[in-house]
Amino acid sequence: MDASQIGFAFLFSIIAGLSTGIGSLISLVTKQPSLKYLSFSLGLSAGVMLYVSFIELLPEGFESIGELGGLLLFLGGLGFGALIDKLLPEVKNPHHLQGRTPCNEYKELLTAEASPLQPVKDSQILVLPNPKGGSRRGGQRHRHRYYGGAMLAEQTEKSSISSQQLYRTGMLTAIIIAIHNFPEGIATFGSSLADLSLGILVTVAIAIHNIPEGISVSIPIYCATGDRKKAFRYSFLSGLAEPVGALLGFLVLFPIMSEAVLGGMLSFIAGIMIFIAVDELIPTAHNCGHGHAALLGLVFGMGIMAISIILI
């Protein structure tokens, strides 16, 4: 293993991490993508990850260290992914927010954009007596404007709370994605060390997966603050966890690197990627409300990887 291969392994992990920022840019400089597009892209990413894991990573891992060792490390990868998911406090874990996934948050934003506040009509102005009374100012009757059937004061208060919730959602999503990106960085780096062509496939799979993640971070923060730069910055920083994970993997594994270690790493990586696809990508794709688009993306992703493996 030469220095150039190690350099490419780090480069691929950086590319995969930067794709989170690409997703953020797409959401901030273009028209917001539809929920059908998000369902398709998440299904596509799941298809890529599942195909690469079952067709490439696991067979190579089993061949290098045997079926029993490969199976145990594969189960270890599944357990590692589940452990990370479990260690996240439930209130901060998008899988336990009573259905409030990035797509559900995004769906609410689209609904809000599709139903703008209506102009105020005279019939929508409610005149209420001041309960205090007495003083000249207090004796006046206060007029509360209704926007779309909601009182302005109440609407303002709700908007303030909503902005805080959106900002918190975006920040927590960024933290969660950064944590999830550590094992993905190890996956990209480890597969590239084993075989650069395999590393390319894994990089493509993770990069496709990271683009919707960038969208899920940037949209809530931008809607809460109106600051495009801040939304992009937090999304970009969450993606940098990927090369950091690659660096940690290098420091731990390089001193003991061998063919058996690489084979075991591939089996372990397959477990992580399959867990991400089954536990995160596919459920979120269906929560967007376009199951057929998610299924089409799943099949399309597997087809892309099948063709890529033949060509590479």
Image (spheres, helix red, strand yellow):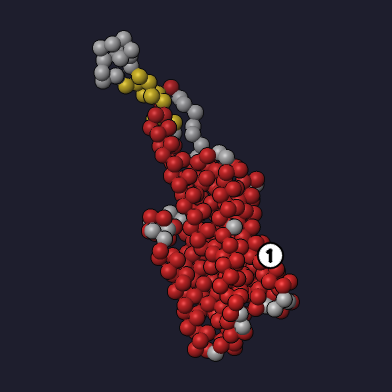
Front position in the image: 158 or 91 = 91
Amino acid at circle 1: Leu
Query: Residue 292, percent across and down?
Result: 54, 64
Vertical position of residue 292 compared to residue 29: above or below: below
Front position in the image: 33 or 83 = 83
Front position in the image: 274 or 78 = 78
Q: Quadrant of residue 181?
A: bottom right
The crowd level at tag 1 (other Cα within 10 Å; few <14, some 14-19, many 20+) is some
Vertical position of residue 110 compared to residue 175: above or below: above
Query: At 50% across and 41% down in the image, what residue appears?
Result: 224
- Can I make out residue 42 in this image? no
Q: Residue furthest front?
A: 255
Vertical position of residue 49 compared to residue 228: above or below: below
Query: Residue 4, percent across and down?
Result: 73, 71
Q: Please state the total of marks drawn on the protein image.
A: 1
The residue carrying mark 1 is: 11
Quadrant location of the C terminus?
A: bottom right
Query: At 51% across and 63% down in the image, what residue appears?
Result: 180
Query: At 56% across and 67% down in the image, what residue appears?
Result: 248
Q: Quadrant of residue 257?
A: bottom right
- Provide the secondary structure element on which disc 1 rests: helix
